[in-house]
Amino acid sequence: MSVKITVDTQSCVSSGQCVLLAPETFDQNEDDGTVVLLAAEPPAGEEEAVRQAELTCPAAAIRLAGA
């Protein structure tokens, strides 16, 4: 089963935790630091890191479906 990722950029508090945990999936907007989704599905080998990013996001802005 594949995991689909969505992010709520309006809720993002720009902590950067997601980028530190899963840099192939998330980045930060250079202007305001909000999350940028690089891939709607985690790249091979980064699935667990994306799950950890969802759990550690202080704004709960990351959602996984099919997890």
Image (tube, rainbow, N blue to C red):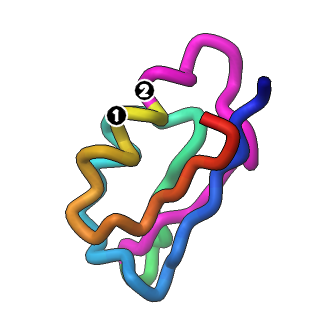
| Spot occupied by residue 31 in the image (x, y as percentages of width and height) | 44, 82
Q: Is residue 39 visible?
A: no
> In which quadrant of the rendered image does the C terminus lie?
top right
**What residue is drawn where x is 70% and y is 36%?**
3
Report which residue position mark 2 lands on: 49
Report which residue position mark 1 lands on: 52
Reply yes or no: does residue 9 show up in magenta.
no
Q: Amino acid at mark 2?
A: Ala
Q: Amino acid at mark 1?
A: Gln
Disc 2 is placed on an element classified as helix
| Spot occupied by residue 63 in the image (x, y as percentages of width and height) | 53, 57
User: Is label 2 in contact with label 1 (beta carbons under 8 Å)?
Assistant: yes
Relative to 53, does residue 51 appear above or below in the rendering? above
Relative to 50, does residue 16 appear above or below in the rendering? below
Reply yes or no: does residue 39 show up in magenta.
yes
> In which quadrant of the rendered image does the N terminus lie?
top right
**What residue is drawn where x is 37% and y is 75%?**
12
| Spot occupied by residue 65 in the image (x, y as percentages of width and height) | 65, 48
